[in-house]
Amino acid sequence: MLAYIFRRLLFAIPILIGVNLITFALFFIVNTPDDMARMQLGVKRVTPEAIEKWKVERGYDKPLFVNSAVDGLSTVTNTIFFEKSARMFIGDFGRAEDGRDIAREISARMLPSLAIALPTFILGLFVTITLALVLAFFRATAFDFWGVVICVAMMSISGLFYIIGGQYLISKVWRLVPISGFGDGLDAWRFLILPVVIGVVSGIGSSARWYRTIFLEEVNKDYVRTARAKGLPETLVFFRHILRNALIPILTGVVVVIPLLFMGSLLTESFFGIPGLGSYTIDAINAQDFAVVRSMVFIGSVLYIVGLILTDISYTLVDPRIRFS
Amino acid sequence: MTGFQIVVLWSDVLVWLLLAAGIGLGVLISKSPPLLAAWRRVGANRMGMASATILLAFLLIGLLDSLHYRVALDGKPGEKTQYGIEVLSLLDALAAPLRTKNEKTYSAPFATRLYAKETVDVPGLGAVREFPRLKHGGSHLGEREDEVLADAGFTAFRLAVLSLLAWLAVVAAVATRVGATANTAADIAVDGSGWQKIWRGETVFAWNAVLATLGLLLIVVVPLFYLSGQYHVFGTDKVGQDVLYQILKSVRTALIIGLVTTLVMLPMAVLLGIVAGYFRGWVDDVIQYLYTVLNSIPGVLLIAAAVLMMQVVIDSHPEWFATAAERADLRLLALCFILGITSWTGLCRLLRGETLKLRELEYIQAAQAFGVSSWRIILRHILPNLMHIVIIALVMDFSGLVLAEAVLSYVGIGVDPTMTSFGTMINNARMELGREPVVWWSLAAAFSAMFILVLAANLFADAVRDAFDPRAA
């Protein structure tokens, strides 16, 4: 098992290098640092000196890959690629436009993101699996038909509508919870409840329908027929046999996003004013803070790859037929 | 008669190219019995055909909005004619009253007065704070302002009756055609006439669903469009622009995002997926590596990074674009391209897996034994057997892309802010629900239009999937 995990981790390295190269190409080769400087400084009042100063302040004045001006190992290390891209591997993300250390900012903002994303994830999973199970239980009835119709209608509604409408109805008209904001400690629940509920509701349509098809695929399999032939009541067949086996395909889709929960959700966090990583990314996009966006891309990829590895491991845990090979 | 200059935007080219490709594909499909049979199954699906009718209506709006021109400015005779910087489309020409009849600021649907009080000079009374009369909305009523409901209701009723008559004519035409297959009076006596067949849903093609949707569409849309010349049927936004006009313009943006993106993604996904699955070995390794890397970057972040970089490129080369419309257009296409790059991996993986299975089948091995070249095998034997996956993926992606556009534009990494789209409409109206009193019509209109489009696309996609997926049968 350990050897398997170790090998999976080794596989992740070339992928991370690829991600790193792509982001580097996107941020430094598609546009030269001069272009970025012009963008940041404003197109009108820009002088060559101002551009040069901007580049020196951020360390963008160096050559891209090979610095022939210095000797020894520095020819490789004293370059934009090494300082801005390669150093991300050791968790050094440099500084944002406002001068703050990006790595520290990220670690501080992870918790608020997680405070929203984790309850949404768990509650959402519970609600959608339950709904899908009920729909599959009443399959081929009017209840199932209209349930699916409602699911399709719900997944056709823009995520923005759920947020805007929910904020309007619950916070403005009914005045149940504050419209946005974030608090420390136990007080935070008042701020958390609305984004979590909206997050769960907006996910119901597509997930419930998807899980329902997974359940329906299991319903007609031989082991289910055997269970029924033994005389098991239908409820027991569903909860003891179908649910367990259907969890395997559900697991693959679900485990991969667990590490990404740290990143938070762009939309939810910006609407509800939650100081997490999602709103950090949005602010960076609006302020055209290239260093922050670059770091977020890299971290997102790392978390995704961790998710893939976790998926493989969880697979081997729940399905005894799969061996580590 | 003022002259005009035809402007061909890149997205227009792609839209018409797509239409041509669609027609070409239709001709090809009609020659391939299995695909034709699958499409016949789609045609028999009532829900699918009803939504297809609605999608066609949207498509028509989008196509009308894809023929662009610039109007010549009135210059002195003898001078070289100058053209206005505003790029208009055929839809703009058809909906000219909607585009030009702007108010000062917010006004509610069917309102005759502005939504905000202003200080107005009334002769004899001096300055009075009141809701000023709209310049265009309900102006034909003159003093009879309180008769809006009666006037609009009566007009709507008259037009609904008229469109009902038009609809009956269409039904009659279809019924004659359906009935024409019955040759003798005896056949009619047994099968019933065309009318009866349609009514009972006995036609192979789901005519009853199409006609019912068409009737509903006509009864709603015709009065709405007629009334929109007299009132602002969906109200006006902050700068007094008609909301209905913005909705109409948003349709094209949504369609382009949904269709052109798949056009970008498709060749890449199909080619790389098949090649990886067929040749295996190092080709497979390279392609797998490529899509794993691209797939590892969370979609939104990759799009954000790419769009930011594209913005820098566009801003540092203002000389590339003659008009603002061209710049917005190119940005839209770049967005489609970026979305395409980030979304081809799923389909590619699917096709690779399917090709791996197909290449082990006997008929492929027979072809190989005959010495048929690899590319020929791929083209003639593998690609046709993957078509159902491609078609399902195509229709399934569309609705997701339309929804994604709204979110991306909201986040600020979507279409150009000057380009009307559902996302920019929602973004501009985001604070309106927080106002006192609430301004709800912009958001409501944008969300409803998007909902109808996406719902129709989803239902149609379901019908297509049910018809093409061999496992479903």
Image: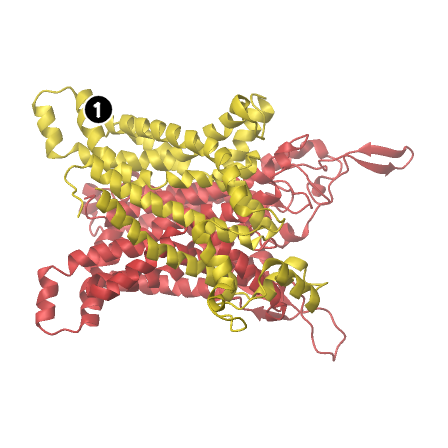
Q: Which quarter of the rendered picture does the C terminus of chain B lie within?
A: top left
Residue B129 higher or lower than B397, as above or below: above
- Residue found farthest to the front: A72
> Where residue B239 appears, x then y in whole percent?
69, 46
Rendered colour, chain B = red
- Colour convention of the picture: by chain
Host chain of mark 1? A
Task: Residue A41: give x, y in percent of width and height.
Answer: 67, 59
Q: Give neighbour class at mark 1: few <14, some 14-19, many 20+ (Cα, 10 Å).
A: few
Q: In this view, does B446 lie above or below B34?
A: above
Color used for chain A? yellow
Image position of B448 with respect to B67: above or below: above
Identity of the residue furthest to the bottom in this view? B78
Q: In this view, does B181 lie to the left or right of A51?
A: left
Q: Residue at x 32, y 52 (%)?
A: A12
Q: Nearer the viewer, residue A94 or B462?
A: A94
Image quadrant occupied by the N terminus of chain B: bottom right
Can you identify the residue that label 1 sits on?
A239
Label 1 SS:
helix
**Where is residue B471, by image quadrant?**
top left
Q: Give coordinates of residue A324: x percent, y percent.
A: 18, 45
Residue A137 position within the rendered picture, expressed as x and y whole percent measured from the top left: 24, 26
**Relative to B159, is B67 above or below?**
below
On the question of residue B104 being in view, the answer is yes
Q: Observer-nearest residue: B441 or A301?
A: A301
